[in-house]
Amino acid sequence: MAVTSPIPGARFVDPAVLARVGNLELVAKSVVDGLINGTHRSPFFGASVDFAEHRGYVSGDDIRRVDWRVYARTDKYYIKEFEADSNANFSVLLDVSKSMSFGEKISKLDYGKTLAGCLTYMANQQRDRVGLITFDHDIVNHVPPSAKHLEVVLHTLDRATATRPGQIGPPLRKLAEHFGRRGIIVVISDFYAEPDEIFEGLGPLRFRGNDVVMFHVLDPREIDFGFVEPSSFEDLESGDQIPIIPDKLAEQYRKLITEHTETLAKRAAEQQMDYMLLNTEMPIDFALFRFLSMRERLASRR
C-alpha cells in the first residue's frame, strides 16, 4: 500500500497507479539546490558515482581521490570530482477556481488532486521536500515545502473545493516571492486565461531557476465539444447562462481550443517549461508514465 495510515487525503494516493510507475523517478531537468542526498543534480560537488571533472591536487586533498591513470600519462596529480545528487523542493500549484469543478465522470479538480497526490507521494519517497499551494483569484492555502509535510499536503488536498472564480495571473505573480530557492514546480490547471496572462504569471517562477511543469487538465467534452442537444451553457466562473446550438458552434470551438493548447505548448517550450495536455478520461497511471518517462529521457541527455 502506498499510504497505510487513514489520514485525510490518502485516497488521492492510488497504490495501483504508483505500482505501475514504480520503476520511474521524478527527475529534475535542470540543476536544483539541495542539502541532502536525493535523486537530482546538485550545483555542488560531492561524493557520487557520476564523474564531473578533474582538478589539480592541492595539499590536504584525500589521496584516495587521485586519478592514478591520469598521473601515469601526465606525471601530474589530479583529483576526480563527482556531481553530488541532491534533494529538491517539490511544490504543486493547484487551481481550485470554480471552473475546475466541471466534469461528467470525474471533475477536473478531483483528477488534479489525484495527480497532485501521486506526484507528491513519489517526490516525498525520493526524499524531496514537498509543498502545496491552492489558488483561484488569490492564494487559498499555502503549505511550504518540507520533508515532513506529506500528510499536511494530502489533508489540504482533501479540503480543497472549487467555489470561487479564478484569475490565474495575480496569484502566480504573488507566488514568485515564495520560490527563491530553485526546485520543481508543478502547476495543475485548466488554464482558462489568455496565454499572455498565464506566462506573465509563470515567467518569474522560471526566471528564478525553477523547473516548471504545466499540466493542462480538461474534461473530454471541453476538448471535442461532444454536445448534441441545444441547451443553455453556464459559465462556471461568472454564473452567466448562454443558449447554444452545438452543431453551429462545434467546429469553431474545436478550432479555438486547438489554437489555445498549441499556443500554450509552443510558449512553454520557448521558456523551457514542460507542458502536457490531459483529459480526465486518461488514466492517471498512463499520464504519469508518459510524463515521467519523458523526463528521464531528457535527464539522460544532460
Image (tube, rainbow, N blue to C red):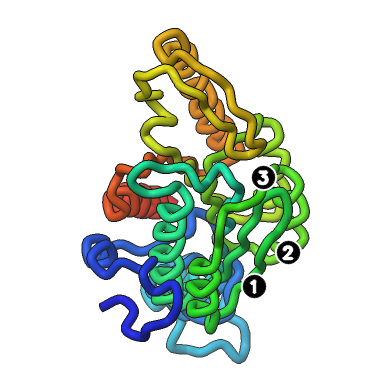
Which residue lies at the image location 56% right of the left edge and 37% below the top edge?
268
Residues under numbered marks 1 and 2 in contact, where contact means CB atoms less than 8 Å apart: yes
- First in sequence: mark 2 or mark 3? 3
Q: Is residue 263 above or below residue 253?
A: below
Residue at mark 1: 144
Of 151 and 100, which appears nearest the observer? 100
Residues under numbered marks 2 and 3 in contact, where contact means CB atoms less than 8 Å apart: no
Of 89 and 113, which appears nearest the observer? 113
Q: Secondary structure at mark 3?
A: loop
Amino acid type at mark 3: Pro
Camera-nearest label, 2 or 3: 3
Q: Which mark is residue 165?
A: 3
Q: CA distance from mark 1 to mark 2?
A: 9 Å
Q: In x, y percent, where is residue 134? A: 61, 59
Which residue lies at the image location 30% right of the left edge and 44% below the top edge?
282
Amino acid type at mark 1: Pro
Q: Which mark is residue 229?
A: none
Q: In x, y percent, where is residue 128? A: 50, 74
Q: CA distance from mark 2 to mark 3?
A: 23 Å
Amino acid type at mark 2: His
Q: Secondary structure at mark 2?
A: helix
Which residue lies at the image location 40% right of the left edge and 60% below the top edge?
114
Q: Which mark is residue 178?
A: 2
- First in sequence: mark 1 or mark 2? 1
- First in sequence: mark 3 or mark 1? 1
